[in-house]
Image (tube, grey):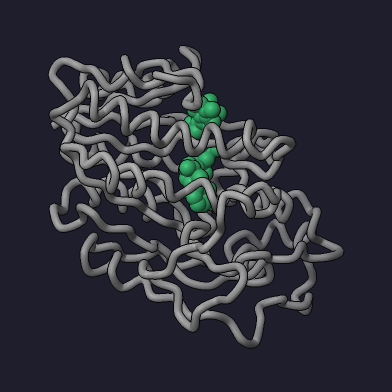
């Protein structure tokens, strides 16, 4: 069984590669450069015949995936994770909506046109496609949709959220041969793979761990922001389960382990890495976790995909260990 995984060099995708190989899938990843492709192959020395890469330089270009989706033997599944994820947006259309929306519709068009054997496409979506910034429901689950409009998406703070719905619209209109599943994580934490990372270029969602370990929150904890999280290995497994479990077709999955705050991360870090004490905020630093917070329901992901979420303490330990390996 053969799988195309886009954005193979990404934080989440690096873990998906490991799970795909463990589960026996023939895996082809897309990367933007030979250098990254070679790093990925080198890190998996005993699986070469099962793992290869193709170059897709920019997901936003017209026809970017037309060649990548063709393969012999042909692909059975596609996992699409490649998307810009940063908050460094100058021009919301060019820097974000274009690559995010065109990248997603582009790959779906290419699969429809050139890869008729593909049965399912799994897309890395986000809690951002669920969250309602105007009026939080009592409980967030898969039935909730972010109501943001295209016009509102021009506002920098909203642009990321707006970019995540295009795939469902495509499938509804085009009725392709494949079905769709989306994985919708909130903030994703967890170990970075050492072969792709430097401390400077650490992925967006793990940056708070770097700040913490480097002593930047010693005087003052940074505001937590969004209080839901999930471990990257659980997110990666969700993607693979979404192709293995037939009932996952046509579904979105809200994958979250629950609540956190920067204070709770700091406390867990003190416990797992007492030697970092001098860099960490004081034990009595104020926890900004709100008294009243929206609920969440992750039961669908547990029932359908069989996920069992890692607890925060373990993720904090493993994330910091991985940062120490790449040289904090
Ligand atoms: P990373 O930034 O680590 O990975 C992004 C991947 O996409 C990289 O492989 C990157 O390639 C590739 N990419 C980015 N822009 C382009 C482009 N224009 N053309 C081709 N490839 C591109 O992010 P994550 O792994 O954290 O995120 C992956 C997905 O998960 C994204 O869709 C993101 O929106 C979603 N997500 C992430 C969350 C998180 O907290 N991390 C939370 C919710 C959703 P390169 O390595 O060469 O830059």
**Quarter where residue 108 is shown:** top left
The residue located at (34%, 49%) in the rendering is: 168
Q: Residue 232 versus residue 122: which sits nearer the camera? A: 122
Residue at the limit of the structure toward the bottom, as seen here: 291
Q: Residue 55 appears at what percent x and percent y?
A: 41, 16
Q: Residue 188 appears at what percent x and percent y?
A: 51, 54
Q: Is residue 243 left or right of residue 150?
A: left
Q: Could you tell me which quadrant the N terminus lies in?
A: top left
The residue located at (55%, 76%) in the rendering is: 136
Q: Is residue 315 left or right of residue 269?
A: left
Residue at the limit of the structure toward the right, as seen here: 219
Q: Residue 130 appears at what percent x and percent y?
A: 47, 63
Q: Is residue 125 visible?
A: yes
Rendered position, 242 above or below 271: above
The residue located at (53%, 72%) in the rendering is: 259
Rendered position, 38 above or below 202: above
Q: Residue 15 versus residue 64: which sits nearer the camera? A: 64
Q: Residue 42 versus residue 243: which sits nearer the camera? A: 243
Q: Is residue 7 left or right of residue 252?
A: right
The residue located at (76%, 62%) in the rendering is: 222
Rendered position, 221 above or below 216: below
Q: Is residue 192 visible?
A: no
Label tally: 0
Q: Residue 19 versus residue 133: which sits nearer the camera? A: 133
Q: Residue 109 appears at what percent x and percent y?
A: 31, 29
Q: Could you tell me which quadrant the C terminus lies in?
A: top right
């Amino acid at each position: 069984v053969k799988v195309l995984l886009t954005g193979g060099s990404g934080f989440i995708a690096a873990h998906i590669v490991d799970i795909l190989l463990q589960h026996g899938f023939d895996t082809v990843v897309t990367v933007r450069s030979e250098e990254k492709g070679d790093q990925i192959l080198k890190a998996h020395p005993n699986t070469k015949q099962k793992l290869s890469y193709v170059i897709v330089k920019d997901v936003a270009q017209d026809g970017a995936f037309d060649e990548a989706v063709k393969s012999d033997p042909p692909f059975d599944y596609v996992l699409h994770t490649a998307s810009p994820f940063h908050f460094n947006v100058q021009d919301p259309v060019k820097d974000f909506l274009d690559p995010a929306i065109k990248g997603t519709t582009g790959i779906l068009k290419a699969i429809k046109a050139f890869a008729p054997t593909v049965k399912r496409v799994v897309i890395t979506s986000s809690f951002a496609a669920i969250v309602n910034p105007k009026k939080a429901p009592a409980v967030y689950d898969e039935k909730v949709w972010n109501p943001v409009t295209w016009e509102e998406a021009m506002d920098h703070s909203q642009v990321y959220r707006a970019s995540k719905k295009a795939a469902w619209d495509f499938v509804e209109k085009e009725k392709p041969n494949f079905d769709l599943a989306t994985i919708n994580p909130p903030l994703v934490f967890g170990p970075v793979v050492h072969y792709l990372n430097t401390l400077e270029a650490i992925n967006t969602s793990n940056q708070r761990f770097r700040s913490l370990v480097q002593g930047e929150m010693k005087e003052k904890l940074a505001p937590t922001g969004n209080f839901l999280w999930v471990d990257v290995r659980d997110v990666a497994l969700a993607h693979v389960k979404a192709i293995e479990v037939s009932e996952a077709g046509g579904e979105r999955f809200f994958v979250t382990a629950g609540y956190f705050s920067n204070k709770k991360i700091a406390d867990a870090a003190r416990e797992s890495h007492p030697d970092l004490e001098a860099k960490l905020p004081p034990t009595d630093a104020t926890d900004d976790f709100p008294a009243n917070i929206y609920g969440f329901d992750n039961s669908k992901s547990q029932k359908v995909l069989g996920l069992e979420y890692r607890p925060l303490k373990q993720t904090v330990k493993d994330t910091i260990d991985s940062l120490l390996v790449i040289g904090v």
